[in-house]
Image: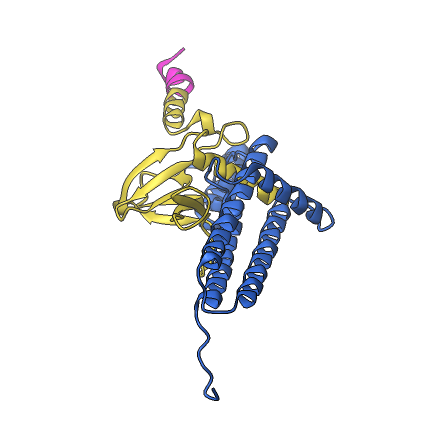
Chain colours: A yellow, B blue
Amino acid sequence: MTVKELGRWVLVPFLAGAIVSANTDVGALPFSGVERLAAVFLLDGQAYFGHLEDLPWSDTLVLRDVYYFEDARKASTGMPVALVKRGREIHQPVDTMRIRRDKVLGIERISQTSVVSRAVAAERALERAR
Amino acid sequence: MDRQIRISGRVVVAAAAVLLVVAVFAIPATRDRIVSGFAPRTVASAAELAEQRDHTERSIARGYKKALDQLSTARRLRLPIPEAEADRIFRSSVAQLGSLRREALGAVGEAYGLGQADIPAYVAQAEARIERLGSDTGSALLAPRLYAIVLRFDQLAQDTADKGTEAMTIAPSPSPGR
């Protein structure tokens, strides 16, 4: 094998594989992976939950299928907060939300067993039931 | 000297395919649709949905009990209106609360995909379950759709309780003719 062939058949696939795998969550691959919900905490104290697209070259984050907490101390649910789906506000925003990167305090991945994930999963099941 | 550049058909097809993919992903709306369509999504199991329904019913029961307690407390006071009138207001308010509770439970049944014909039976079963089990145990973060039903019921029940309390506790103002 010549040096040129080595570069073509070994190095290029190796580099391509390294780049792709470094930016891919194998646990959240389309069709086969588990859902990857993220929590985005903003500097003003608000938190949003959804599917996060965080491209390093973009100055904004994109959240899809967005949910957030609302004060529910006056409601009879027995919980201090309630989960609300974004899109039902008076201005009816479409589901995608863009957030300026410099307004973000932190980003965390949400466990599949968390109360937020379970409430989101229930909402989806109810959407399908209708 | 002119040099001829040869490009094979396969390279042209591959380049066109790459350009097409780049063009599709460059349009934000298209990319959003593709990415969100392919993203894996978890859907609650039947057992998890039943648990959510249980917590929703208990939340409605708590809201009902709170409003009923307010009316009962007001009814026990020495009221500035005749007893018969106070009884009438109390019974009317309690009936309204029951009606609101049935409507809220009906909305829960609707959210769970029950047909209009099945909803009355579900409401009757849920009311019996609430009466039997009470409302004091457990709480959970509800699905937004279910929370909206509970919140609406709470607002209407509180409004009914406030109006009933006011009608029982405020003395009728003397008319100018008296």
Q: Is residue B3 above or below residue B81?
A: above
Closer to us: B36 or B175: B175
- Residue A79 falls within the magenta-colored stretch: no
Closer to us: A51 or A130: A130
Task: Report x, y in % for residue B76.
Answer: 47, 56
Q: Which residue is at a point 48% across and 32% down the rendered structure image?
A: A35
Task: Report x, y in % for residue B178.
Answer: 47, 86
Task: Report x, y in % for residue A13.
Answer: 41, 21
Q: Main secondary structure of the magenta part?
A: helix
Is residue B6 something one can see in this rendering? no
Q: Is residue B116 left or right of residue B177?
A: right
Q: Is residue B171 above or below residue B15?
A: below
Closer to us: A122 or A97: A122
Q: Which residue is at a point 65% across and 47% down the rendered structure image?
A: B123
Task: Report x, y in % for residue B167.
Answer: 48, 67
Q: Is residue A41 left or right of residue B33?
A: left
The residue sitting at the bottom extreme is: B177
Q: Which residues are magenta?
A: A1-11
Q: Quadrant of the N terminus of chain B?
A: top left
Is residue B125 something one can see in this rendering? yes
The residue sitting at the right extreme is: B117
Q: Quadrant of residue A1?
A: top left
